[in-house]
Amino acid sequence: MAYSDKVIDHYQHPRNVGSFGTSKDVATRKDVGVGIVGAPECGDVMQLQIKVNEQGVIEDAKFKCFGCGSAIASSSLATEWIKGKSIDEALSIKNTQIVEELSLPPVKIHCSVLAEDSIRSAIADYKKKNGIAAGTDAAAATH
Amino acid sequence: MAVKLPIYMDNAATTRTDPRVVEAMLPYFTEKFGNAASRNHKFGWEGEDAVDLAREQAAALIGASPKEIVWTSGSTESNNLAIKGAARMYAKGPEGSKNRGHIIAAAHEHKAVLDPCKRLQNEGFDVTFLQPPADGVITRAMVAEAMRDDTILVSIMWANNEIGTINEVPEIGALCHERGAIFHTDATQWVGKMPTNVDKDNIDLMSWSGHKMYGPKGVGALYVRRRNPRVRLEAIQDGGGHERGMRSGTLNVTGIVGFGKACELAMHEMDTERERLLGLRRKLERDLSSRLEVVQVNGHAERRLPHILNISFGYVEGESLLMGIKDIACSSGSACTSASLEPSYVLKSLGVGDELAHSSLRLSLGRWSTEEEVDYAVEGIVKAVNHLRTMSPLWDLYKEGIDVSKIEWQTH
C-alpha cells in the first residue's frame, strides 16, 4: 500500500509522542484527561492525553499509538490540531477532516474514526474528573 | 561489502528466477517456439523434446517416473486438480447425493487447499480440518484419530508457508496407504529445498510450483502416482486431452523448460544451499532475540524449513513495522497488509494471540541472501521496533507491569 507523504512524515517524525505520567499518575490528575480507544486484537490502540488549563483550553496533548502507519499519523495529527483549542472546539473536529488532511484510503478510514474517538474519550475523562456534565462549558469548572 | 537496497527477504512469496533458468528458456520464445503437440514437423518435435527433458528433470528431483508428472499453471491449480479431481473420482456417491466421502486437511493449509475442500463440502463431501497444536506440526497420530472408514482423501501440506513448520508427511502417507486413502501433499515450500522421494515418503499426489524454487511464475507440476496405488483423477479443464487427459491445454513449453532447469539446479545445489540458509536464519533469529525483549518465534523450534523465520515483536503492530523497514522486503501477519481485517489465520490456528499475530513478520531467505543482508535487516528491525515501542501505549503498560491481555478493551 502506498502512503501519502503526510502519513510518512507523521510516522517518521510523530508530533507530541508521550504522556504526562504513568497510567496510575494520570488517573488521579484532574488537569489531565485520558482517552484510550481500540483494542490490541483489532490491531490498533490509541492513547490520547490532554492537559487542560483553567480557561478550559487544551494547553498540551500527548499521544501513544499501537497501530498501522495511518493510525499513528491520525493520532499525531489529532494532537497537533487540538493543542491551543478549547475543549468545545476540539470536540468539533471530525474524522473526515483527518481523512482529507492525510489522504487516507477507504480501508484506513477507521484510523481517523479512532482518532476522533480518542479526542472525545479524553475530553469525557477530563469532564468526569472535574464534575462537568457532558455538553457543559469546561471553563466554568473550578480546579 | 555494501548491501544493495532494497533487500529481498520474501522468498516464501516468490523467488528471483535464476539467470541460468532464464538462459535455458530463451530459445523457446523465438527459435524453438513450436507447439509440443504438433507431431508432424521439427518445431513441434523440438517443443516435445524440451518438455520430455523437463519431465525427466522434475521426476528426478522427487524420485518419480517422468510419466507421473502433470504440468499445470502452478500450485493453486495442482492443488485444485489433486483435491477436487481425486474426491470426485473416488466419491462414494453420485453427484447431488450426500455422504460422498470423508476428507482430512489441516486448518493452516494454504487457501489453495482450504478453498477446494470447502467447495467439496458443498458437493456432499465431509471435510475435517485438523486444528494444529501450538507448535504447528500435524502428526500421524492426529490424522489417525480423524481417520474414518469412509475417508477417501487426506491433504496435508509438507511445510507451512507462513511459519515453515514441517508436518509428519512420510508417516501420514504410510497411514493413508494402510487405510486405503489417497494422500496428497502441497509441497510448494518444500520441493527444491529439501530431499524428496515420493516412494519412500509415501506420497500419491504432490503439488509444487516453479517460482518458489528459482524457476518462472505460471508453471507448476502435480505428481500423480501410477502404481501402488494407481491414482486416477477427474479432470477439471477439458479440451485437447493433453497430459493424459488430466489437464488439457497447450503446454507452456517455455515455462516448463524453466521449471525443469530449476529442478536440475535444485537437485545439485540443495544440500549446500540448505546448510548455508540454515546458518543465516539461525543468525537472524539469534540476533533479533538477543537484542530485543518480548520476541516470540512462531512454530516448532526445530521442525522448520531452513529459510523461513516467523517472529512476533510484542506491542508493535506489523504494518507499522513494515513501514519502518521499507528497505527490507518481507511479509507481515498483520491484518492491515491484506484485504481482510483478520490477522493471519495460520498464526491464529496455532493459538498465537491476535495481538502477537498482528505483530509478526515473516522473513524468508533465498539463494542470493547474504550475511551482510542479515546484519542489515537485524539493524533495521531493531531500530524500527524500538522506535515503535517508544510510541506504543501497550509497551508502556507492559513496562508498568500491567497485563495487557487482562484489560477490557473497548472493541469497535
Image (cartoon, coloured by chain):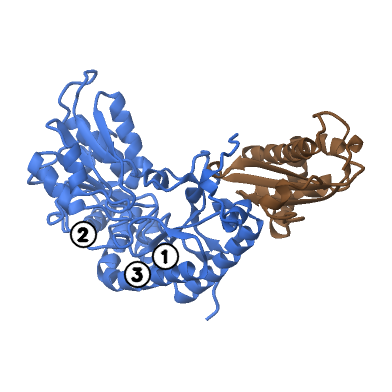
Q: Which residue is mark 3?
A: B278
At which x and y percent is residue B291? Answer: 51, 70
Q: Determine contact: label 2, label 1, CB under 8 Å.
A: no
Structural distance between the alpha carbons of marks 3 and 2: 18 Å
Q: Which residue is mark 2?
A: B196
Identify the image quadrant of the C terminus of chain B.
Answer: top right
Q: Determine contact: label 3, label 2, CB under 8 Å.
A: no
Q: Amino acid at mark 2?
A: Thr
Q: Residue at x 81, y 38 (%)?
A: A130
Instruction: Give the mark nearer the N terminus: 2 vs 1.
Output: 2
Q: Is residue B313 left or right of residue A22?
A: left
Query: Quadrant of residue B277 in the image?
Result: bottom left
Q: Secondary structure at mark 2?
A: loop
Instruction: Give the mark nearer the N terminus: 1 vs 3.
Output: 3
Q: Secondary structure at mark 3?
A: helix
Same subunit under labels 3 and 2?
yes
Q: Determine contact: label 1, label 3, CB under 8 Å.
A: no
Which chain is the one coloured blue? B
Q: What colour is chain A? A: brown
Q: Which mark is residue B365?
A: 1
Local packing at callout 3 (Cα closer than 10 Å; few below 14, some 14-19, many 20+) is: some
Question: Is residue A138 visible to us here?
Answer: yes
Q: Is residue B170 left or right of residue A19?
A: left
Local packing at callout 1 (Cα closer than 10 Å; few below 14, some 14-19, many 20+) is: many
Q: Nearer the viewer, residue A101 or A63?
A: A63
Position of B282 relative to B220 (above/below)? below
Outermost residue toward the top in this view: B96
Q: Nearer the viewer, residue A92 or B371?
A: A92
